[in-house]
Image: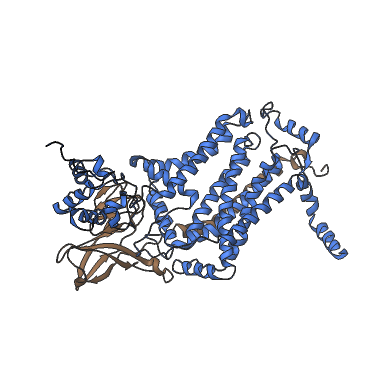
Chain colours: A blue, B brown
Amino acid sequence: MQIFKRIWLWFDDSTGLSAALGPVMSHPVPRARKTAWFYVLGSATLIAFLIQVATGIALASGYVPSSGQAYSSLVFISGAPIGRIIRGIHYFGANAMIILIGLHTIRVYLMASYKYPRQVNWLSGVFLLLLTLLMAFTGQLLRWDQTGYWSVLIAAQQSGRVPIIGNWVGHFILAGDSVGGATLGRFYAAHVFFFPGLIFLLVGFHLYLVVRNGISEAPSIDRPVEPETYRTWYHALLAREGEAFWPYALWRDAVFGLLVILTVVGLAIAIGPPGLGKPPDPTIVQATPRPEWYFLWYYAILSLIPKWSESLVMFWGPVIFGGALVLLPLVARKGQRSPWRRPWSIAIVAIVLFMIAYYGAVGKVAPWSPRMDAPPLPASVVGTTTGPIAQGAKVFHDKGCEYCHLVSGYGGIRGPDLTYAGDTMTPAEITTRIYSGATNMPSYRGNMTPEELSSLLAFLESRHRQPIQPPAPAANQ
Amino acid sequence: MSEDVSPEVAGQSSREMDRRKFLVRLTVALGSVGAVVVVAPSVAFLLGLRKTPQTWRTVGKLEDFTVGSTVNVSFEDPSPLPWAGVTSQSAAWLRRVNDQEFIAFSMICTHLGCPVRWLADADLFMCPCHGGVFYADGQVASGPPPKPLNRYPVRIHNNNVQILTLPVTIS
């Protein structure tokens, strides 16, 4: 072992590493309080990123970034020994990175650690958050199955809503006039080189700032931030009761970081990577692209807002949200840090989390999507197999009514449930609705023969809560 | 530290200061030129979007299509890259209106770009994403789409039905 020590001493003498990094590693940080475990989220995000780098390199060695072959190369990777696990780790690592950077952002926001002097720490973090989301989007797209293919077109169409330059941006995303051989390469280059390179740079900058400005102390109600005196006070605090970062703080990061790694690898082995969809062939008409869970809430909101506001929300929504994150440390640069004295911050976090969970759940159900795979109504629901009612049930399916309207648990939920249509609407009302349509229902005036209409009416009128009792014969007559 | 006196402290002649200023500017200028020389062509390459010529692509023989029916047809990119594979294909909904007349609709929903499906029994196009519905003529029937379905020009050439390829329309 003497030999290794001598090699290290020679190396250290040559490079000066321990002299340069020693003080950084052992720089004093505020003594651990009750909140100490909340401070592991940043390093855990970095660990999740490093998981992505390691597995990403492995995946890139098997992936062929060509529009025509990427899909089959993924089929190959998924079938290779360990390949399935590597894909799984990369998938759950991505999920972990998103969750952890979200929690880290919330921690910093709630404790107002973004205030003086750590404003640029926050700003660099905002760009890291944006880059993480871009990595998530481009990553699911590189799966290059049917959903990946249509994601490109949907991204291009959404970008089209940007004022003035939208059309150009849309075609920039496609890399030309349409999706083709040139398209996938730019997503590959962005996901594998450009965004990770920026992340490395910004993480380095972020960590440098953490050392320069010091880890924020636990907030206290009695001690609002005063920029004029803060640094002096902070250094006095460190001199009084500071502990060396390594190992007195870093051990917690090691514990939590390993927990993250074990969870990600465990999920990868137990559950495995997400299955590949159909190949990216635009001639396969049966395609229902859906975003991953972390964008589902946004998909849901875009689907639920009024039609007129769509282009505005698609453009201004991200601009306002991003702008608010950037402006936050510049506007709220001093004063109270305790979340108990900033109750609105707790409310904002609660609202954001609720929105992500609630609209994510709504997006999962996607009530606005027609169920185009709804089977014809079975005879047990229709109640008969012959006559106008059975005819009407067939019309109900064939004309697409069933894709949006539910009858006894069959069909879509975009329009009103028609299980008891016979109780709630008269034939005249139903006819009016079928003929005139509505905002979200087409008019069938030119698409239905009188015979079809009358059988459809017969079917809908037969939808009752209870079978109608024949009128009782009058007594004593 | 103490021996390493900076030029300002030492008190320089104004000629020396001018030289210093000049060298600072020279270094920054040379560095910028070097950066532009490398970055400009890289960015220009990324911005050079692939323009494809418009071509008539045959999607079938005249007798393959029945008057009144709307079917899914596919055709290839005007100049497909060798590695584009299935993505060089495009699909459209083609209807034979009468003996000599065809209409071809883009499959791309004008709302957010999902692929619309033709419901033959209902004479409607429906989008599986947000339930946008278009009438048989491509006009918006209901739901969120802001514009009618886009159309491709169609012609009959030597008994072949041909579609004129078009760039994807970004709404």
Residue at the image position 78 percent from the left and 38 percent from the top: A242
Numbered marks: total: 0
Residue A446 can be seen, yes or no: no
Q: Identify the image quadrant of residue A151.
A: bottom left
Residue at the image position 50 percent from the left and 66 percent from the top: A65
Q: Can you give x and y, in whole percent of width and height, for residue A109 in the image?
A: 59, 37
What residue occupies the far right of the structure in this picture? A2
Q: Can you give x and y, in whole percent of width and height, for residue B87 in the image?
A: 39, 65
Give the answer, above or below, for where B44 lies relative to B8: below
Residue A201 in the figure: left or right of residue A274: right
Give the answer, above or below, for where B31 lies relative to A81: above
What residue occupies the far top of the structure in this picture? A222
Residue A62 in the figure: left or right of residue A399: right
What residue occupies the far front of the structure in this picture? A476
Q: Can you give x and y, in whole percent of width and height, for residue A229 in the image?
A: 71, 28
Quick one: quadrant of the N terminus of chain B?
A: top right
Residue at the image position 49 percent from the left and 43 percent from the top: A357
Give the answer, above or below, for where A398 lies relative to A343: below
Give the answer, above or below, for where B91 lies relative to A301: below
Residue A5 can be seen, yes or no: yes
**Frontmost residue, A473 versus A219:** A473
**Frontmost residue, B143 versus A153:** B143
Q: Identify the image quadrant of residue A283.
A: bottom left
Residue A180 in the figure: left or right of residue B65: right
Residue A350 in the figure: left or right of residue A430: right
